[in-house]
Image: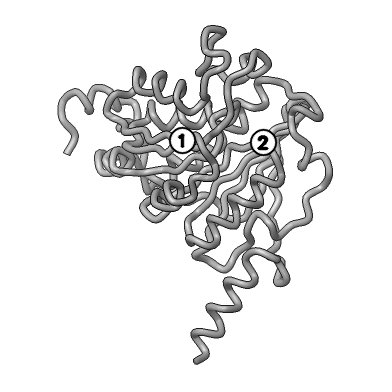
Amino acid sequence: MLNASEYSRYSRHLLLDDFDEHAQRRLNNAKVTLFGVGGLGCQVASALAAAGVGEMVLIDDDTIEISNLPRQWLFTEKDIGQKKAEVARTRLLAMQSACTFHCITNFNDIAARDAHLTTSPLIIDCTDSFTSRLAINALAVTHSVPLISAAASGFIATATAFNPEISGPCYACPEYNSEQSLTCFEQGIFSPVVAIAGQLQAMMALSYLSGIRNPEWGSLHHFNGQNLLMRQFNIQKNPDCPTCSKIHRSEDHAHSL
């Protein structure tokens, strides 16, 4: 049960319809693995820590550069040259001392990464390249862990949730267009768009982890920062997907034996 301090801290959550003490406690007991602590990751990690998520794994081997500062709001000029994951942990602990943060600053440390994936009920992809998103999606499918992925470039933000435990699509199912596969380094980025994409991820994650609402698995949420238009598209499952079709076909074969 929540103590008096926790009741005071999360009182605005507890006033929400369908959100009660049990929902907040589920957040306090939740664990999330977060890939990337850049523009998206700073938003997501801050929102989850402030909301009371109890444990986070921060995976990022990048260092802070001056060009990061307009959109990576956990960092300051004094942090330039330091590891993003380590600086983020320090700032997040100052915000939420009850949360446990694990830092992995070497993407090649597969043992450390996979050890956390086996105990994490949710993966959040906050990386900024198409290649890394495909790799993280493959991990989610292999470990059968739900994945929330987002992207932001130019004035466009997108966010989607996938669940390998159901028969829907994965991130690799659709054929993404060239605009979505560009990074902010290639196309530029309007800083508030990153915040919107990250907060969409955070909203889906908190709703799922608290148990108040599941994300709309396989739905692409698309925000245009030039006209402030939000649209939603359903992603179709690709029966020949190079990532998830092999898993499902092997499972179907096992069921038939």
Instruction: Look at the numbered discs 2 and 1 and tell me whether their residues touch, using CB distance below 8 Å.
Output: no
- For mark 2, give the secondary structure: loop
> How far across and down, in percent of the image, does residue 53 sit?
35, 36
Furthest residue toward bottom: 257
Q: Could you tell me if residue 224 is visible in this image?
A: no
Position of residue 71 relative to residue 149, above or below, is above
Q: Could you tell me if residue 114 is visible in this image?
A: yes
- At x 65%, y 70%, the residue is 245
> How far across and down, in percent of the image, does residue 23 sit?
31, 42
Label ID, residue 236 = none
Label ID, residue 58 = 1
Left or right for 14, reference 1: right
- Tell me which amino acid carries mark 2: Asp
> How far across and down, in percent of the image, does residue 88 sit?
46, 23
Badge 1 local density, few (<14 within 10 Å), some, or many (20+)?
many
Quadrant of residue 41 in the image?
top right
Quadrant of residue 195 in the image?
top right
Colour basis: one colour
Position of residue 99 relative to residue 168, above or below, is above
- Tell me which amino acid carries mark 1: Leu
Along the viewing direction, whichever of 189 and 116 lies nearer the viewer: 116
Q: Mark 2 — residue?
A: 128
Position of residue 90 relative to residue 178, above or below, is above
